[in-house]
């Protein structure tokens, strides 16, 4: 099972949400400063958010109703 990872890069104030551990082959801008990355099969593999601290409260991360691992 793959693990979702959140990477914050202070020097660029960007947050990358790594959904699966596969390389992206295509990126699409869906809103100003929000880029979705897809693999060769069109599966969403990551989300890049520029100027993240201006768009999100990065002081805490909360998960809600995630399924438990078996």
Image: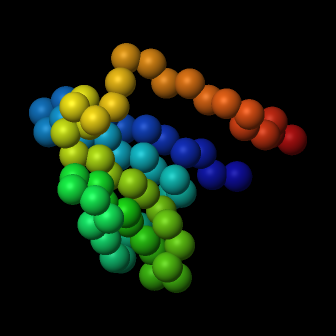
Image quarter of residue 67: top right
Outermost residue, left direction? 11
Image quarter of residue 14: top left
Image quarter of residue 46: bottom left
Residue 26 is left or right of residue 4, and the answer is left
Q: Is residue 31 above or below residue 15?
A: below
Residue 31 is left or right of residue 6, and the answer is left
The residue sitting at 45% across, 74% down in the picture is: 39
Quadrant location of the C terminus in the rendered image = top right
Residue 10: image location, x then y, percent: 19, 30
Q: Nearer the viewer, residue 66 or 41?
A: 66
Outermost residue, right direction? 70
Q: Inspect this view and state whether residue 9 appears.
A: no
Residue 24: image location, x then y, percent: 38, 69
The residue sitting at 35% across, 76% down in the picture is: 25
Q: Inspect this view and state whether residue 11 appears.
A: yes
Residue 28 is left or right of residue 39, and the answer is left
Residue 65: image location, x then y, percent: 74, 34
The residue sitting at 59% across, 45% down in the picture is: 3
Outermost residue, bottom direction? 41
């Amino acid at each position: 099972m793959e693990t979702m990872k959140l990477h914050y890069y202070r020097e660029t104030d960007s947050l990358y949400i790594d959904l699966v551990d596969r390389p992206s082959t295509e990126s699409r801008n869906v809103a100003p400063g929000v880029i979705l990355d897809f693999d060769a099969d069109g599966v969403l593999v990551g989300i890049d958010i520029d100027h993240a601290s201006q768009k999100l409260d990065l002081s805490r991360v909360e998960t809600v109703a995630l399924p438990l691992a078996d």
